[in-house]
């Protein structure tokens, strides 16, 4: 069973925005889509740029601001090139208004 650790307050997440948080030495990107929280690595698999620094959210997808690669925030799958590898996703749970994430 995965260990969930606190990452950020749910009220810090905004629809259409990317919230970057360092958790356990990893830079993660958090999203709020249709009232649900999601988490991915904060690094585009195309050339490693930060998704939160220049990226943006359209519906349920994050778009890398550098070269336009797109990923599903729910599954991490690539939805538009130039990326070919998915971005890693992490399970989240909300407890008492705090977003918890499982890193392993």
Image (spheres, helix red, strand yellow):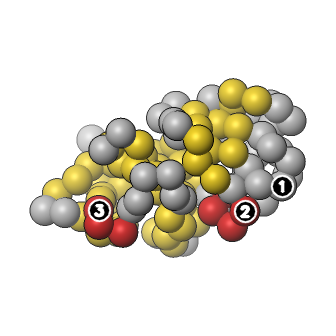
Q: How many marks?
A: 3
* Rendered image quadrant of residue 98: bottom left
Which mark is drawn over residue 29?
A: none
- Residue matched to label 1: 66
- Residue matched to label 2: 54
* Rendered image quadrant of residue 6: bottom left
Mark 3 nearby-residue class (10 Å; few <14, some 14–19, many ≥20):
some
Q: CA distance from mark 2 to mark 1?
A: 7 Å
State the image coordinates of residue 27 (x, y, percent, origin top left). Answer: 58, 66
Which mark is drawn over residue 10?
A: 3
Q: CA distance from mark 3 to mark 2?
A: 22 Å
Give the residue drawn at x 81%, y 37%. 83
Q: With 41 as the anchor, is 74 left or right in this view? A: left
Name the residue furthest left: 96
Query: Mark 1 or mark 3, which has the lower sequence index?
Result: 3
Mark 1 nearby-residue class (10 Å; few <14, some 14–19, many ≥20):
some
Q: Dots 2 and 1: beta carbons under 8 Å?
A: yes
Q: With 32 as the anchor, is 40 left or right in this view? A: right
SS at mark 2 in the image:
helix
Q: CA distance from mark 1 to mark 3?
A: 27 Å
Query: Mark 3 or mark 2, which has the lower sequence index?
Result: 3
Q: Is residue 65 above or below residue 83?
A: below
Give the residue drawn at x 53%, y 67%. 20
Q: With 102 as the anchor, is 39 left or right in this view? A: right
Q: Is residue 74 above or below residue 3?
A: above
Query: Mark 2 or mark 1, which has the lower sequence index?
Result: 2
State the image coordinates of residue 35 (x, y, percent, origin top left). Answer: 30, 44
State the image coordinates of residue 61 (x, y, percent, origin top left). Answer: 58, 38
Give the residue drawn at x 32%, y 43%. 36
Q: Dots 3 and 2: beta carbons under 8 Å?
A: no
């Amino acid at each position: 069973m995965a260990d969930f650790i606190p990452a950020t307050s749910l009220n810090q997440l905004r629809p259409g925005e990317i919230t970057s948080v360092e958790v356990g030495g990893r830079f993660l990107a958090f999203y709020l889509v249709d009232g649900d929280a999601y988490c991915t690595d904060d690094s585009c698999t195309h050339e490693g740029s930060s998704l939160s620094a220049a990226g943006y959210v359209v519906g349920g997808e994050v778009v890398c601001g550098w070269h336009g690669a797109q990923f599903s925030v729910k599954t991490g799958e690539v939805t538009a090139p130039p990326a070919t590898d998915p971005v890693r996703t992490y399970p989240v749970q909300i407890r008492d208004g705090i977003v918890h994430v499982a890193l392993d």
